[in-house]
Amino acid sequence: MTLLITGATGFIGRHVCAQLTHDHDILAVLRQPDSQLPALRQQVNALGGQGERLQAVQGDLDLPSLGLPENLAAPQAIIHLGARFAWQLDRATAQRTNVAGSLAVAELARRHGSRLVFISGFMLENREHLQRLSITSDDPDQVDWQHVYRRAGGYEASKLEAAIRVRALAATHDLNLVEVQPATVAGHSRTGALDSAQPLFALLDNLARGRMAMVPGSPEHWLPLVAVDHLAALIAVAATADSVPQRLLALDPTTPNLQGLLAIAADMLDRRAPQRHLPIPVLAALLRLPGMPRLMNTWPEALHFIQPTRFDTTDTDHFLNQQGLARPAMEAVIARSARWYQQHHGNPAAPQPA
Ligand SMILES: NC(=O)c1ccc[n+]([C@@H]2O[C@H](COP(=O)([O-])OP(=O)(O)OC[C@H]3O[C@@H](n4cnc5c(N)ncnc54)[C@H](OP(=O)(O)O)[C@@H]3O)[C@@H](O)[C@H]2O)c1
C-alpha cells in the first residue's frame, strides 16, 4: 500500500511514519525535500521505523493544488497532518495553510479515489464550546467565521473551519473521509519524548519555572491527553484497516483533572504542586493585560483546551479493541513526559509557588 502524508516532519507525523514504514511505503509531501528527507529518515529509524521506505515529493499547503506534480501516482490513502500550529496566528495565514491547504488535500484525495485520514482536534466534539462560538450548523456557509476567529483565535478557528468544510465536501462529493480528533498530545508512552513546541511542553515548562502558582479552572477542569505513539498507531490503522468509523476521538478519558496532572508532573520536576484554583475567566482577564501572555508564557487561546466537558469515546474504544490497540496508562505517560522534560531541559532555578 502506498500512502501519502502531509506534516511528516512534525511531532505526530514522525511517529506515524515510524509505525507505518514497517509494512508500507510512504510518500511525504515536504516543502524542502532535499534537506528534510535525510533528517526525517534518521528520525524515523531512531523511532524504530524503516526510513528507507520513505520517499518525498515537493509540495506546500500554501500553494494552489499544493504545488504537486500533475502526474502523481494515486495513493491508497492520504494522511493529512500538516498545519500551522501556533498561537496568535493571523486569520489570513491560518486560513491559507489550515483551511485552503486542507481543502486542496481533500480535493487531491477525491480526484485519486484515496481514503482521506484528516486530523482535526477533540474540540470538534465539544458541543458546548461550539455553541459558545455560535457554530450550530454543519453548513460552513451558515457560520459567522469572523466571530469564530475573533473568539477562538486563528489556530483553533482554522482547525474548526477546515474540519467543517472538509466534511461538507465529503458529503457532497464522493470522498472517503476518516476524521481523527486528537486531544492535546503527550510524550511517547515509553520514553516520554515531547517536542518543545507542543502545548503540554509549555505547561511543564511553566510548572518547572514556578509560573503556575494556581491551577487554572475548577476541580472539574481537565486537559484531555493522548500519548503520541498511541495516536500514531490509531492514525496508522485509520489509514490501512478495511473498515474504519468516520470519526475517531483520540482522547484518553482517564486523563486526571488538571490539578492531578500538575501534581504528577510536579512530583517528577521536584516542584510543589499548585493546590488552589484560579477561575478561567479571571485568568483570561489577567492575560488581556499588555505583556502578561509573554510573562506567564500562556496565550488566552490555549485556555479553551482546559475545560470541564467529558467526551464519549465508545466508538473509538470499540475500534481500538478490534485493532488490538490498548491505551497506555495516562498517569505513567504524564510522569514520563515530565521526567523527559526534566532530563532534557534541565532544572531551571525557580521560586516555589506560594
Ligand atoms: N499536537 C497536538 O497537541 C495536537 C492536538 C490536536 C490536533 N493536532 C493536529 O495534528 C496535526 C499535527 O500536529 P503536530 O503536533 O505534529 O504539529 P507540528 O509538530 O507543528 O508539525 C506541523 C507539520 O506541518 C507542516 N507544515 C506546516 N506548514 C506547512 C505548509 N505550508 N506546507 C506543508 N507542510 C506544512 C510542518 O512542516 P515543516 O517541517 O516544513 O515546518 C510539520 O511537518 C496538526 O494538524 C494539528 O492541528 C495536534
Image (cartoon, rainbow, N blue to C red):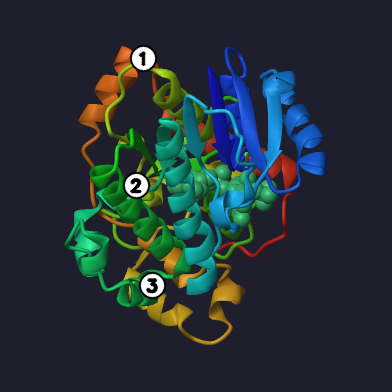
Viewer-closest of 102 and 270? 102
* Contact? badges 2 and 3 (CB < 8 Å): no
Residue 149, numbered circle:
3
Distance, label 3 to label 1, CA atoms, is: 37 Å
Amino acid under disc 1: Gln
* Contact? badges 3 and 1 (CB < 8 Å): no
Identify which residue is drawn at 72% across, 56% down: 348
Q: Residues within 10 Å of mark 1 (few under 14, many from 20)?
A: some
Residue 167, percent from left and from top: 29, 47
Q: Would you place residue 103 above or below residue 215 in this image?
A: above
Identify which residue is drawn at 61% across, 27% down: 17
Q: Would you place residue 264 above or below residue 127 in this image?
A: above
* Contact? badges 1 and 2 (CB < 8 Å): no
Amino acid under disc 2: Phe
Residue 122, numbered circle:
2
Task: First in sequence, mark 2 or 3: give its number.
Answer: 2
Amino acid under disc 3: Tyr
Identify which residue is drawn at 55% across, 47% down: 82
Q: Quadrant of residue 150?
A: bottom left
Q: Would you place residue 290 above or below residue 313 in this image?
A: below
Residue 130, percent from left and from top: 24, 61
Distance, label 1 to label 2, CA atoms, is: 21 Å
Residue 72, percent from left and from top: 60, 34
Residue 323, numbered circle:
1
Residue 262, percent from left and from top: 47, 49
Q: Residue furthest front?
A: 71
In-image side of 50 versus 127 (left or right): right
| Disc 2 within 8 angstroms of ligand 1 (CB) | yes
Of labels 2 and 3, the one closer to you: 3
Distance, label 2 to label 3, CA atoms, is: 18 Å
In-image side of 132 versus 160 (left or right): left
Q: Residue furthest bottom?
A: 290
